[in-house]
Amino acid sequence: MIEGLVTARIDLSFMDRARAALSNPDLRPAWKQLSKPFRADLKDHRTKQEGPDGTWPRLASSTKLRRASGRRRRARRLLGRLPGATGVKLERARMLGRSLVRWSSVHRDGGRAGHGAVIPKRDFLWVSQQFLDHASTVIAKGLAYLIEVS
C-alpha cells in the first residue's frame, strides 16, 4: 500500500564547478609560495654536501694538493656556483627547477669533464622529503581554495 509519493530535487551544481576548477587548476600562487623554500632546500643540500643517495664524495687528493699549492687565491666551495645557480619556472600545474649552468650534468651524473678530469657524482638538484611534505600541504590548501571559490 503506497500512501504518498516523495519528490526530491538535489542541486549538485557545486560539484560541477569544483570538477571544472580541478580539471585545469591554476596553482601558481602555491608554487610562488613554495619557490623560496625550494631554493632553501637546495641550499641546505649544498651546505650539508649530500645527495639523495648520501653524502657527496670528498675531493680527490690531487685536487687538494693543487689547491694547497697556492695557485688558487680564493676559497672555493665544493661545487662552486652550481647549487646556487638554479632557475624556477612557475606554470599553472607544475613548478620546474633546473640548473642554469650548461655543464652541470657532469657534476650531477658523474663522468669525464672537458679537460679529462674525472668527476664523481654529486647530485645537487633534488628535493628532500621534508620539502615534499611541506609542498603537499601548500598544494592541498591551494586546491581547497580553488574548490571554495568556484
Image (spheres, rainbow, N blue to C red):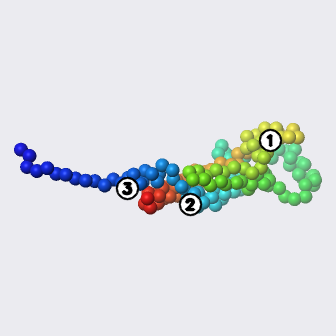
Element type where label 2 sits in the image:
helix
Element type where label 3 sits in the image:
helix
Q: Residue at x 54, y 56 (%)?
A: 27
Q: Residue at x 57, y 57 (%)?
A: 28
* Location of residue 88 with respect to 53 vertically, above or below: below
Alpha carbon separation for disc pair 3 and 2: 23 Å
Q: Nearer the viewer, residue 60 or 140?
A: 140
Labels 3 and 1 touching (C-beta < 8 A): no
User: In the rendered image, which residue does mark 1 sit on?
Assistant: 119
User: In the rendered image, which residue does mark 3 sit on?
Assistant: 14
Alpha carbon separation for disc pair 2 and 1: 39 Å
* Location of residue 106 with respect to 45 vertically, above or below: above
On screen, residue 142 versus residue 116, left or right, reads left
* Location of residue 113 with respect to 81 vertically, above or below: above
Give residue 20's position: percent from left, percent from top.
45, 51
Chain-order first, disc 3 or disc 2:
3
What residue type is disc 3 on?
Phe
Give residue 35's position: percent from left, percent from top.
63, 58
